[in-house]
Structures are given as structure tokens and as C-alpha cells.
Image (cartoon, rainbow, N blue to C red):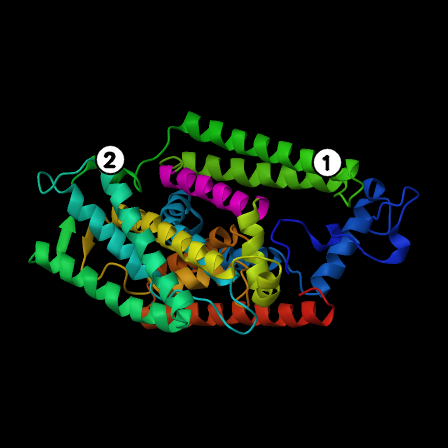
């Protein structure tokens, strides 16, 4: 089973007989608290050679994207375009979080997928828009949000029951769902609007994806994020040292804290030089933190990775495999509802084509490009953010260059294929070294 936490391979326990210390406690073959930075970096290099690439492909990709589009279009690296990127990637990120969970429960060669997620999100957005119409029925904004999420979560439950109880593969089930829910969106929008477009008239709902934080609040949140991250990393390092486990050297931890501080505060500075930090970006960060905690620190999260690693072994270990799959599809439905709300809030309306276009391609690409394995049991929730950042940056750059739609599809498809190729090669390397 793949490790679902953010531990690096250099931090996993070596079970060799010669790794016992004087107290009989097993360590990784060296005194973890005294591991040098050089040793740690050497272990990370070996792990990369074994297929544990971590965020390296993302970092290289983002640098390449910035260089290429920055040279071709001067507007790409401006503060205004950076803020636009944060807004554009939000709906994709929310949807990709749910898709990450779906991919994690794949078992080996049997891919778990949701091809209907874009139109499920559109259904949620349509429900929201229909319920908020003044006096028809004119629900309060919070009730509209709850209703939309309840509907999409129920759709996730329906899909999961068809998959687990009727034995129909997720590919076929959600392909049928794609057709059904796209039809539902079409019927609802045309029934209540002859033009096929219904606008959001509630200012609170419109502001979900278009409001910006005051500069002082953006700085405050940025500093708070750095402090929380630093405290978590230092506490974790100390805790592992006290338990005799491998721990990152202090120099490495401090380096990571400095890097996170530079990225976070730099992003806040750039956003504040334009319109400010988007409110939806903070909302996304909260969801990422919450689902990361669920995936890495709870029994439910461990069961997800166990099912994705080997569902038969998980079943023999006493895990309710079908129950996990049902819960995961409900999580996906829940996040589809959240993503759909953000999507229609950003568009300020819902239309017959909401959920169509390349949204599904971008969502699945974001999850895979971010580092989630198509083969199950390997990946992190933050993959959704990483992948969405990459795919949105590419889309944004091509839009600025005025590329044709056909070219955009070709480029996006090539990037997705490259990400799957990297995933496949990494999996083979991990398998060859007994790490998969």
C-alpha cells in the first residue's frame, strides 16, 4: 500500500534485521535524529530514482510554462493575470479534489474514474440558480448552497450503489451519468428560460467567486499560513525524533519553511498589487487542508489507500471495501456540488452548455498531472491544486496567445498523456524495487 501522508520515502522505516538500536527499537538503519542534510538529500535522490518523484515534475512544469508563455506573451507574468489564474483554477481545483479520491480507490489495472463529474457539478449549479430566483422560490443563499450540495452528494451515492451493488464498472456507470446529467441540465435550463440562460441575482452567491480580500486581511492570512505550516513541520520533526523514527534534518525543515513563506507571501504581494487575494482562493485552501487531514490522519483515509493498494487484502483485513467506495463517491459528489457552485458563481449564470466543453478533460487532467496515480493507492489531495495550477496556466497562456480551440485540445491532451506516462514509468520503478 502506498503511503498517503506527505512522508518522503527517506522517512519510512527500514525493516532490516541490523536496524535495531540498543533498546531493541527498530530505526531506519541510522540514528534518525542525527541524520545529516547530505544523507537526507541522498535518500531523496535514491527515492526519485526508484520512482518517488514527488512534486518535482510539477515544479519543472511550472517553471517551463512560465518561461515559455512569459517569452511569448508579456501579459502572462503580470499581477493581473496571476489573479486571473487564481480565479480560473478554482472550479477545476474543487472538482479535482473529488476526482483525486476516486482515482485513489482504483485497484491495480482496474481504473476508477468519474466521467460525469462536470455535468454533476452543472446539476448542482443549476439547482442553486433555480432556487435563488427572487420569489420563484427565492430561497436564502445558504439554503440554495445546501440544496445544491445535497443533490450532487445524492448523485454520488446513486453512482456508488450502481457500481458496488450491481457490479457495473465506474467507467460505464459514469459515462451513462455524463449523458443523463447533461440532459438534466439541458431540460432544466430550457424549461425555466426560453433563452437557455438563467442569471444569478443574489449578490452573496455572485461574490463567492468574485470577491477579493482587503490587503491587510490577505497579509494576515498569508502570515498565519506560514506560522501554522512552520509549527506543524517542527512539531512533526520533534515528535518523530522522540519516537526514534526517521526525521528530516532541521536544516531541511527550515529550508522548506523559508520556501513556503517565500511562495505564500510572494503570492499575497502579487495579488495585493492588483485586486487583492480572491476570497475563493482562501475557501479552496480551507477545503484542501480539511480533505488532506481526512486522507492522511484518519482511519477513513487509511482505508481509502488500502483499498486502492489492494482491495482484496483490504477486505481480508476487515475493511468494508464497498462502504469505502460508496463514501468516496459521495465525497466526489459533495465536491462536485461545491465546484459547481463556484463555477456558476464565476459565470454569474447557468446555461444549457454549463459543464460542457473541456471542463471534464481539465478536471481529470488536473488530478493526474498533479501526481495522483491512475492505478490507485498513490497520490495526495494537494495534487488537485498542483494539477489545476498547471492545466490552468497552460489554458491561460494559450488564451492570451489567441490559439484556436483545436490547438488547445491537442496541447492539453499531450500534457495529460505525458503525465500518465510519467505515472506509469514511476509505478514500474516502484514495483521493481518493491515499493508499489
**Labels 1, 2: front one:** 1
Residue sitting at x 64%, y 68%: 426
> In the figure, 190 relative to 166: above or below?
above
Residue 284 in view in this figure: yes
Q: Nearer the viewer, residue 80 or 88?
A: 88
Q: Nearer the viewer, residue 410 or 194?
A: 194
**67 with respect to 181 (left or right):** right
> In the figure, 261 relative to 429: above or below?
above
* Residue 204 circle label: 2
Q: Nearer the viewer, residue 326 or 54?
A: 326
**Secondary element at tag 1:** helix
Residue sitting at x 78%, y 44%: 245
Residue sitting at x 59%, y 71%: 424
Residue farthest to the left, as pictured: 194
Instruction: Find residue 155 and report its horizontal and vertical position in percent.
Output: 31, 57
> In the figure, 293 relative to 155: above or below?
above
Task: Find disc 1 in the rendering and name its residue.
Answer: 239
Q: Quadrant of residue 313?
A: bottom right
Q: Earlier in the sequence, mark 1 or mark 2?
A: 2
* Magenta-highlighted residues: 278-297
Gap between marks 1 and 2 measured at Cα: 44 Å
**Secondary element at tag 2:** helix
Dominant secondary structure, magenta: helix
Instruction: Find residue 58 and report its horizontal and vertical position in percent.
Output: 56, 57
Residue 283 part of the magenta-drawn span: yes
**32 with respect to 374 (left or right):** right
| Quarter of the image where the C terminus is located | bottom right
| Quarter of the image where the N terminus is located | bottom right
Amino acid at each position: 500500500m502506498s503511503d498517503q501522508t506527505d512522508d518522503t520515502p527517506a522517512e519510512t522505516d527500514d525493516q532490516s534485521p541490523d536496524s535495531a538500536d540498543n533498546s531493541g527499537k527498530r530505526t531506519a538503519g541510522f540514528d534518525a535524529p542525527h541524520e545529516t542534510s547530505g544523507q537526507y538529500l541522498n535518500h531523496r535522490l535514491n527515492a526519485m530514482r526508484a520512482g518517488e518523484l514527488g512534486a518535482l515534475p510539477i515544479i519543472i512544469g511550472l517553471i517551463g510554462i512560465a518561461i515559455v508563455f512569459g517569452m511569448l506573451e508579456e501579459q502572462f507574468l503580470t499581477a493581473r493575470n496571476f489573479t486571473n489564474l487564481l480565479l480560473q483554477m478554482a472550479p477545476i481545483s474543487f472538482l479535482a479534489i473529488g476526482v483525486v479520491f476516486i482515482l485513489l480507490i482504483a485497484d491495480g489495472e482496474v481504473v476508477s474514474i468519474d466521467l460525469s463529474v462536470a455535468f454533476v457539478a452543472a446539476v448542482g449549479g443549476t439547482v442553486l440558480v433555480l432556487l435563488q430566483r427572487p420569489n420563484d422560490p427565492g430561497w436564502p443563499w445558504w439554503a440554495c448552497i445546501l440544496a445544491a450540495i445535497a443533490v450532487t452528494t445524492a448523485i454520488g451515492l446513486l453512482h456508488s450503489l450502481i457500481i458496488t451493488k450491481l457490479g457495473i464498472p465506474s467507467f460505464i456507470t459514469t459515462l451513462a451519468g455524463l449523458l443523463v446529467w447533461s440532459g438534466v441540465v439541458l431540460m432544466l435550463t430550457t424549461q425555466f428560460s426560453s433563452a437557455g440562460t438563467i442569471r444569478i441575482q443574489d449578490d452573496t452567491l455572485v461574490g463567492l467567486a468574485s470577491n477579493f480580500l482587503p490587503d491587510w486581511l490577505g497579509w494576515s492570512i498569508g502570515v498565519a499560513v506560514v506560522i501554522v505550516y512552520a509549527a506543524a513541520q517542527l512539531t512533526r520533526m520533534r515528535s518523530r525524533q522522540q519516537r526514534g523514527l526517521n526525521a528530516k534534518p532541521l536544516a531541511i525543515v527550515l529550508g522548506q519553511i523559508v520556501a513556503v513563506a517565500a511562495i505564500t507571501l510572494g503570492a499575497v504581494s502579487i495579488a495585493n498589487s492588483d485586486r487583492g487575494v480572491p476570497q475563493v482562493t482562501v475557501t479552496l485552501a480551507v477545503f484542501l487542508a480539511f480533505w488532506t487531514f481526512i486522507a492522511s490522519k484518519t482511519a477513513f483515509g487509511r482505508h481509502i489507500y488500502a483499498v486502492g493498494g489492494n482491495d482484496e487484502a483490504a477486505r481480508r483485513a476487515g475493511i468494508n471495501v464497498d462502504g469505502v467506495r460508496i463514501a468516496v463517491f459521495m465525497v466526489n459528489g459533495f465536491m462536485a456540488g461545491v465546484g459547481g457552485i463556484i463555477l456558476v458563481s464565476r459565470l454569474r449564470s447557468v446555461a444549457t452548455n454549463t459543464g460542457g466543453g473541456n471542463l471534464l478533460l481539465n478536471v481529470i487532467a488536473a488530478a493526474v498531472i498533479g501526481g495522483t496515480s491512475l492505478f490507485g493507492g498513490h497520490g495526495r489531495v494537494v495534487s488537485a491544486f498542483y494539477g489545476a495550477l498547471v492545466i490552468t496556466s497552460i489554458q491561460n497562456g494559450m488564451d492570451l496567445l489567441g490559439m484556436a480551440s483545436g490547438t488547445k485540445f491537442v496541447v492539453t491532451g499531450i500534457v495529460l498523456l505525458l503525465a500518465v506516462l510519467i505515472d506509469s514509468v514511476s509505478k514500474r520503478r516502484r514495483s521493481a524495487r518493491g515499493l508499489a
